[in-house]
Amino acid sequence: MSKLPFKPGNMLYPLPAVFVTGGDLSSGDPSDFCLMTAAWTGTVCSDPAMTYVSIRPSRYSHDIIEKHMEFALNLPTASLARQLDHCGVISGRDENKFETQGLTPIASSTIKAPLIQECPVNIECKVTQVLRLGSHDMFLAKVTAVWVDDRLIDEKGRLDLAKADLISYSHGQYLTLGRSLGSFGFSVRKKRSNSKKSRKGGKA
């Protein structure tokens, strides 16, 4: 197998596919809050917990999010794939996407932007910095609250995201996450276990 050159570009796939919501739900006016689909999002820092979303300045949601300097990331299930795609190609200038797509805006706890009831995970974010990068502006944000469906919490209180049936995005395709290949640290877990047994055996 040989390598072939490919044009420089964003090749870091797959990515999370999420609904981004912004604006002010409390106004009661649908034109004051927004809903869009994004895949240019991810983790920036764990302590403090920080994330980002990169949005083209031409997008309807861009100015709303910049005005309020906050947004929410709402993780969709595979059953919401059609709505997710629709919200990525239709502008909020043309329709109320919450209404047309049967999605329910609900109040958040630390920001004014709405959350989406139908999404199993909702992440509230306050923007700390806007970076003008070129085709997109990056909204760096601190995570201020997280909500998860109770069905995702097991009997020991642990979060089981495998039950959420989340969606990823790769080169224009929406994908489910597929089968598990192992949990973090599985590659060395057996070696460590055997090493401990050997040490105990040596002391006997």
Image (cartoon, rainbow, N blue to C red):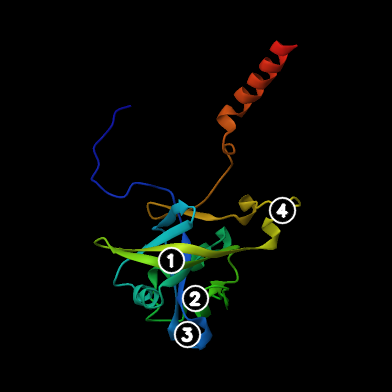
Q: Are the residues tagged 2 and 1 within 8 Å (C-beta)? A: no
What distance separates the C-alpha of mark 4 from that of mark 3? 36 Å
Report the residue that reaches farthest toward the front. Answer: 203
Give left or right: position of 73 versus 118. left
**For mark 3, what is the residue?**
30
Q: Amino acid at mark 2?
A: Ala
User: In the structure shown, which secondary structural element does the residue marked by tag 2 occupy?
Assistant: loop
* Disc 4 residue crowd, few under 14, some 14–19, many 20+, Cα 10 Å: few
Q: Nearer the viewer, residue 92 or 86?
A: 92
Give left or right: position of 128 versus 116. left
What distance separates the C-alpha of mark 3 from that of mark 1? 17 Å
Numbered mark located on residue 157 in the image: 4
Residue in the image at 26% along x and 60% along y: 133
Q: Earlier in the sequence, mark 4 or mark 1?
A: 1
Res. 31 image quadrant? bottom left
**For mark 2, what is the residue?**
113
Residue 101, given in percent of the width and then of the height, sits at 52, 75
Q: Earlier in the sequence, mark 2 or mark 4?
A: 2
Q: Amino acid at mark 3?
A: Pro
What distance separates the C-alpha of mark 4 from that of mark 1? 30 Å
Residue 1, given in percent of the width and then of the height, sits at 33, 27
Q: Earlier in the sequence, mark 3 or mark 1?
A: 3
**Tag nearer the camera, 4 or 3:** 4
**Tag nearer the camera, 2 or 3:** 2
**For mark 1, what is the residue?**
37
User: In the structure shown, which secondary structural element does the residue marked by tag 3 occupy?
Assistant: helix
**Tag nearer the camera, 2 or 1:** 2
